[in-house]
Amino acid sequence: MKVFVAGATGVLGRRAVARMVAAGHEVTGVARTPEKAASLRAIGVTPVTVDVFDAGAVKDAVAGHDAVCNLATHIPPTLMAAMPGSWAQNDRIRTEVSRNLVDAALVTGATRYVQESIAFLYADEGDGWLDEDSPIVPVGYVESTLVAEAEAARFTATSAGGAGVVLRFGLFHGPDSNSTIETVALARRGIAAAVGEPDAYQAFVTTDDAAAAVLAALDEGVGAGVYNVVDDEPLTRTDYAAALAGAVGRSSLRLPPKVATKLGGSKTGLLGRSQRVSNRRFVAASGWRPSSPSAREAWPKIVAEMGEPPAQPRLSGFVRAALASVGAGYALLGAWALVAPQGFFDTFPGGGHHWVDVDGPFNEHLVRDFGALNLAVAFVLLVAAVKGGRTLVRTAAVASLLWSAPHLAYHLAHTDVLPGLADRVSNLSSLALTVVLPVAALVISQRWPASPKSPAVAGAMVR
Ligand SMILES: NC(=O)c1ccc[n+]([C@@H]2O[C@H](COP(=O)([O-])OP(=O)(O)OC[C@H]3O[C@@H](n4cnc5c(N)ncnc54)[C@H](OP(=O)(O)O)[C@@H]3O)[C@@H](O)[C@H]2O)c1
């Protein structure tokens, strides 16, 4: 069968196309860079460079194929996932690219269209099993996913006997998946990255098993429709955390506090639901079985495949703690000044002391701007504290110093503004810390190994 795959270079896609080639299919995969084209060619896939948002170009590229798979996504990094607009590109891919691919598949007379979807779109049903007909709550990124699913249904309805197949995948686990890498890194620090109630279920699938499901979905025996592709036994957050703990060699992991689910709004809210999703329909239709029946079997294999964690650079814990403490201070300061500028001006730092209103008149504009800029610096510092890495740590330290050094210099030159010695000492010592800690971070990180270049720069397939 001649198969066209969008998203062939992704975490799922590159495994799926390798399996297709091994099964004897002739595969064309979309590659956006020469390096990715070369990596597809190396595994027997014919690369094609096409703008998947250009309907005409997609029709030309898809012409002559028997089957079309849409495995393209653009999931934002975990730290950005709650930011406004962070899902816009993914929404565009789900809606426009699915439409373009289905139009092209219809024009060329393909008989099969496979669409990647997600299994974490169902309503919370506690410990009840969920199948493909269970209620869905169409919020957040689920909306565009449902549009993509509707495109697959349009293919079924409009093609001459063709089948549109939707695969609703559980959360991916794979040694090269960004989310897995972050999950394992947190687990090694004693934290389970699993929002929601301890007894809530969550459905997973390994990227290898997901790729096997994509291949199975090409078989004409699998009828048109929607299928859950998850492992056999979704675990509760508690059991999941225990499995992950064992895999990273810890006795247990802490689940995040409930507030973590609330902070991300609808995005993490979706992931926080109890979703005990069943794979029975797909197993019956295709004969596919997950090689890892649950996260209990999956985690040890994945962690072993990932190998030993890279050695932490010298004093990395101290550097991260230093950036985190300065960042947390700026975050508090910034939020206060931005949200309640008059209160901040009148009463900072609190406890009956006055460090701001003693030095010039109130100006709401300036105080709010001061608050917002503090939050901006705090954001950079806190991301650097969580992610680490030489480049990010040093960037954050310099950004922080560009603010804190002139601030300290001003106060050193105006010590007379504050009324008493105690105020002067605590003012200057707290400001000195905001300079000393980033300087320490800069000095220590100078000898750290260079951060890996981004995939775009290195042209590497390292998600
Ligand atoms: N069910 C799940 O849990 C689930 C589902 C999806 C993703 N994820 C996770 O989220 C992380 C990031 O996902 P991701 O979606 O960024 O990467 P990904 O899953 O690794 O791959 C996405 C694929 O779509 C392609 N693509 C993206 N934007 C495109 C565009 N504008 N034009 C053409 N092709 C495009 C990518 O091409 P390039 O290689 O050129 O970028 C890549 O081939 C991954 O670690 C993955 O595990 C999880």
Image (tube, rainbow, N blue to C red):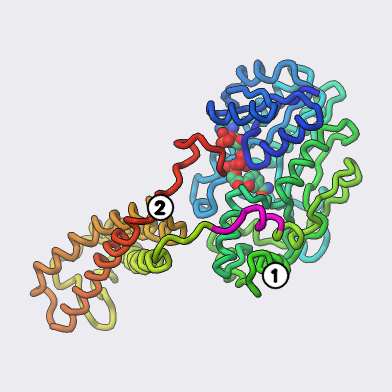
The residue at label 2 has a CB less than 8 Å from ligand 1: no
Q: Amino acid at mark 1?
A: Ala
Q: Earlier in the sequence, mark 2 or mark 1?
A: 1
Task: Give above or below for 221 relative to 321.
Answer: above
Residue 389 x %, y %:
42, 54
Residue ID for mark 2? 449
Q: Is residue 306 magenta?
A: yes
- The quadrant of the picture showing ligand 1 is top right
Please indicate whether residue 217 sits to the left or right of residue 377 in the image: right
Q: Give SS at disc 2.
A: loop
- Residue 245 vs residue 107, the one in the foreground: 245
Please indicate whether residue 21 sits to the left or right of residue 439 in the image: right
Dominant secondary structure (helix, strand or loop) of the stretch shown in magenta: helix
Q: Is residue 224 magenta?
A: no
Residue 409 x %, y %:
14, 64
Residue 324 x %, y %:
39, 66
Please indicate whether residue 73 sits to the left or right of residue 455 in the image: right
Q: Residue at x 32, y 56 (%)?
A: 446
- Tell me if I can see residue 307 in this picture: yes
Q: Which residues are magenta?
A: 301-309
Residue ID for mark 1? 242
